[in-house]
Amino acid sequence: MADHINPNRRKHLKGSATTLGLILLLGKADIAWGATILGVRVWPSEDYTRITLESDNALKVSHQILTGPDRLVVDVTGLQLNPTLRDLVAKVKPNDPYVSQIRVGQFQPNVVRLVFDLKEPIKPQLFTLEPVAEYKFRSVFDLYPTTPPDPLMQLVRSSAKKEQALEKKNEEDLIAQFAHRQDAPVAQAIPAPKDTATSPRFKRLITIALDPGHGGEDPGAIGARGSYEKNIVLSIAKRLNTKIENEPNMRAFMTRDGDYFVPLHTRVRKARQVGADLFVSIHADAFIQPHARGASVFALSQQGATSTTARWMANKENASDLIGGINIKTTDTQVAHLLLDMSTTAQIKDSVQVGSAVLQRIGGFAALHKPKVEQAGFAVLRAPDIPSILVETAFISNPKEEAKLNDEGYQEQIAEAILQGIKDYFAKNPPVARRSAA
């Protein structure tokens, strides 16, 4: 069996301890029923927990939900219990929001039973993914809560103190302005202040949606030294999140804050749910040529890509859903296609403006791949009412830039440059009306 798995394949499947990846090379006795388990992985998150069984052939899976206590029972036909599946028991993290433990056993001579003991009722989605990229067949169990978390309410709670402080400052400014007008001579009377909902003088919190690319089953690009794009961009996004939270008139929302997969349209939907004023997707991509270098900023295009590289990048990023694994049978997919066809000319214009401001800041200390904002059909940038940019922080496929991407100092510089570019944009284009959540 080992002769059929090349070193790169084995390296990809092993993953790291944090991803809970596991690979076991099996003997003839383990594949007597016609399927080889190549790996098992568990990806917990507040949104949902994903369990993945990867095999060389598609598995026949059935399931049932039991209550008192809550359990999900999954039967896999055509397998004998082997060490790979047994070790799945130890892969559940204590902080998993939905799974307390997993039990496995040989239910019948050719049926392995998995029992997921649940912390609360769930709505499962079970589906099979065809081979793609480095992966063979994957049986995916997505365990969603019956009541999904509300990202807007979470954001409101986390920024309540900052919101109150800003409202108090606005009230103080209004009182001071009114008192000044009352004290002024009649001939020099100060005009009454404009409506506080539309006057830039009266500030509100600016919401920035931060989108670390890839995650979970989708590692993104992998550098020559084994760096995963998904890990690097999450680190940069967290640094930027901290910087934004230190700004008195800004708050940040992250589309993912851990190592799990979020479909592209869900990232867009989350940003709209929290009424984001700006969407920033962070990446560290690879190119077919290892000497490609420099940071880039991209915006959406409705009329074709501005360069061959931009088109190649967009196609690669848009394939993230296939690699990360989405259930194409869900109605969400129909909603996604509808949403992603609603982009507007105004949104693209604003995106290019904010992208230019960010690119200028990055160019102050780092090499740029192109001196201007490039455009292509990136699916994740298609929010119809939110300026959206995609920042390629450097090429992870370039060994020198891969080293920089792993450097904390460079990550801090990139995060600071993005922040300053955002501030430059909003200084010239203050949001004057609260955006309604959709």
Image (tube, helix red, strand yellow):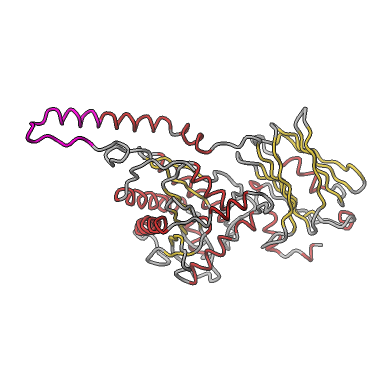
Question: Foreground residue, 248 or 375?
Answer: 375
Q: Residue at x 49, y 55 (%)?
A: 342
Asked where in the image residue 206 lies, by quadrant, the reply is top left
Asked where in the image residue 202 lies, by quadrant, the reply is top left
Labels in figure, total? 0
- In the rendered image, residue 97, in percent from the top left (x then y), is placed at 64, 35
Is 361 left or right of 325, judged from the image as shown? left
Q: Residue at x 65, y 49 (%)?
A: 331
Compared to residue 102, the image places residue 110 above or below, namely: below
Q: Which residues are magenta?
A: 173-193
Q: Residue at x 68, y 59 (%)?
A: 11
Q: Say if the magenta span includes residue 186.
A: yes
Question: Foreground residue, 402 or 147?
Answer: 147
The residue positioned farthest toward the right in the image shown: 109
- In the rendered image, residue 275, in percent from the top left (x then y), is placed at 45, 42
Q: Would you say the magenta stretch is mainly helix, strand or loop? A: helix
Compared to residue 40, the image places residue 393 above or below, namely: below
Q: Residue at x 53, y 56 (%)?
A: 340
Q: Say if the magenta span includes residue 273.
A: no
Question: Foreground residue, 400 or 389?
Answer: 389
> The N terminus is located in which quarter?
bottom right
- In the rendered image, residue 417, in percent from the top left (x then y), is placed at 38, 53
- In the rendered image, residue 213, in percent from the top left (x then y), is placed at 54, 53
